[in-house]
Image: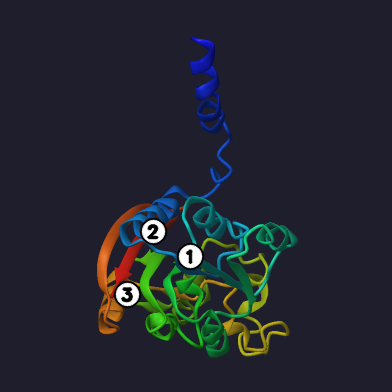
Amino acid sequence: MPHLLKKALAPIVSRLTLPDTFAYLNRDKKALIDFAFQRFGLRSFADLGGVWNVAGGYTFYALEKFTIEKALLVDTDFTDEVIKRARAYSSLELIEGNFGNPEIVARVGEVDAVMFFDTLLHQVSPDWDKVLELYASKAKHFLILNQQFTASKHSVRLFDLGEEEYFRNVPHARNEAPYSTVFQKMYEVHPQHNRIYRDIHNVWQWGITDSDLIARMESLGFSLQFYKNAGAFGTLKNFENHAFVFSR
């Protein structure tokens, strides 16, 4: 290869051989972001509850891949890693709090899109459908990947199934915190969240059906733009990963 050509190709080869720093993220969620941001030219977003287990990875993925003017990462618990990494992005704001709180909704303000990845089924008081309503006037697009319930026609509150059936429908053991105490302390106030244990978002709360989710979004003026059944969720027979994009 001529020296000049080799020199010209060197930067391209270097980029192609760099390790993928986002390889640990779920490919269906990355594909959902790619589809929506490219199709609709999104320039602002709020990643709601996007810290746990991924350290804000989908926020940083979108910031690295697209031109973003305003980004918000909202959660109740931020790790040192996330706080440190966020300093590199002037367009990113970290908001600490429950994204179902009206005060947090007001702080988020208007954005092109909101992202709910693995978070809707945790939302109570306000419930998942009310949370969607809270953000319906704030965002033009909803990106959702949720573990959807397939065992009934309508959504169910998992606690209402009873303790035995509850643990047959969640990917957690009875001896895991906070699951180990949630049934015993069901109506006691949780010291961190200042709400009863039955209503904390740290545990699985809902089995949400596709029909209920789509109907709720349509009632809020949104139409389904993208849907994918991303397959089984672990060994849970009554849940599947489903991906959605809704727009108004």
Note whether 45 is above or below 243 in the view shown: below
Residue 151 visible in rendering: no
The residue tagged 3 is 213
Q: Earlier in the sequence, mark 1 or mark 3?
A: 1
Q: Which amino acid is tagged 3?
A: Leu
Question: The C terminus is located in which quarter?
Answer: bottom left
Note whether 232 is above or below 44 in the view shown: above
Q: Nearer the viewer, residue 65 or 154?
A: 65
Residue 8 image offset from top left, x and y in percent: 51, 23
Residue 79 image offset from top left, x and y in percent: 71, 63
Q: Which amino acid is tagged 1?
A: Asp
The residue tagged 2 is 37
Distance from the alpha carbon under mark 1 to that under mark 2: 19 Å
> What crowding class fits label 1: few (fewer than 14 Cα within 10 Å), some (14-19), or many (20 or more)?
some
Name the side, left or right, on which 7 lies relative to 35.
Answer: right
Element under disc 3: helix
Element under disc 2: helix
Q: Quadrant of residue 73?
A: bottom right
Q: Nearer the viewer, mark 3 or mark 2?
A: 2
Q: Nearer the viewer, mark 1 or mark 2?
A: 2
Q: Nearer the viewer, residue 81 or 177?
A: 81
Residue extending furthest toward the front: 4
Residue 196 image offset from top left, x and y in percent: 62, 88
Name the side, left or right, on which 27 lies relative to 189.
Answer: left
The residue tagged 1 is 118
Q: Residue at x 43, y 85 (%)?
A: 134
Q: Nearer the viewer, residue 190 or 99?
A: 99
Distance from the alpha carbon under mark 1 to that under mark 3: 14 Å
Q: Residue at x 33, y 65 (%)?
A: 245
> What crowding class fits label 3: few (fewer than 14 Cα within 10 Å), some (14-19), or many (20 or more)?
some
